[in-house]
Image: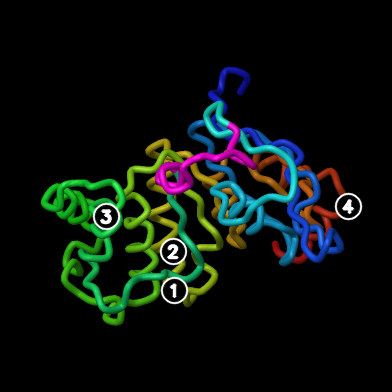
Amino acid sequence: MTNAEKMIEVRDLKKHYNYGQIKALDGVTVDINRGDVMVVIGPSGSGKSTFLRSLNLLEEPTGGSIVYKGEEIVGTKIDIDKFRQNMGMVFQHFNLFPHKTILENLVLAPVMVKHADRAESEKRAKELLARVGLSDRANAYPVQLSGGQKQRVAIVRALMMEPEVMLFDEPTSALDPEMVGEVLDVMKELAEEGMTMVCVTHEMGFAREVGNRVLFMADGRLIEEGTPDDIFNHPKSERLKDFLSKVL
């Protein structure tokens, strides 16, 4: 992938707590290229979510560098709201406004933040809802939706801002097992369309099938990275072999 366009360059990224006693991230270096579907795996507490949240500065790194499309974003005075429009984020929990309909939830940010035309935003929201199989739920309220449906709405909400990168932080971990597939299907479709994605997940099947690059993290460090074949079929480190023996 020598000709790949680098979108995000992460260098020696650190995030320490408690005056350096807890090293959530301890010197992570990686490039994220346009069109990558990068899947981040590892045991709980390994720094996966901290890494993801640092990419859009929900976590302020203690040290290191993140360059997004040629611009340093750590420790600089960038317009954080404008910057975050480029990175859609989908969390474990859906964070939908319970008192607003699904359609109102979806048009809120484009209209308020990007000053988009409301009618255009509603049209786009309905198109995206149809794409994820929820065209009949535009006027429903979040309480009327299943967990899987809410998470699909959360993905659409992120897509409404037309981001260049989608960040997924364990998007299926709060779902009942039978709802996991419907969310992963939407993510697979996005991957096939060339969306640049970084996904923290415990779904090893998804990592294997959809990711083009897999990162294995443990103890705040990037231990191994490679293709799904490299990571799952030819692990090098004992730490990764041990992890895979427990999850596969």
Percent of width and height locating residue 88: 43, 50
Query: Which is more toward the observer, 242 or 87?
Result: 87
Foreground: disc 3 or disc 4: 3
Identity of the amino acid at label 3?
Met
Quadrant assignment, res 162: top left
* Left or right, 158 with reference to 121: right
Marks 3 and 4 in Cβ contact (< 8 Å): no
Tell me the distance, in whole angstroms, between the alpha carbons under discs 4 and 2: 31 Å
**In the image: residue 49, left or right of residue 89:** right
Q: Secondary structure at mark 2?
A: helix
Q: Residue at x 85, y 55 (%)?
A: 239
Farthest-out residue, front: 77
N-term mark: 4 or 1 = 1
Q: Which residue is mark 2?
A: 181
Dot 2: few (<14), some (14–19), or many (≥20) neighbours within 10 Å?
A: some
Cα distance between the residues tagged 3 and 4 = 50 Å
In the image, residue 5 above or below residue 208:
above
Q: Which mark is residue 238?
A: 4
Which amino acid does the dot numbered 2 rest on? Gly
Residue annotated with mark 1 = 178
Magenta segment main secondary structure = loop
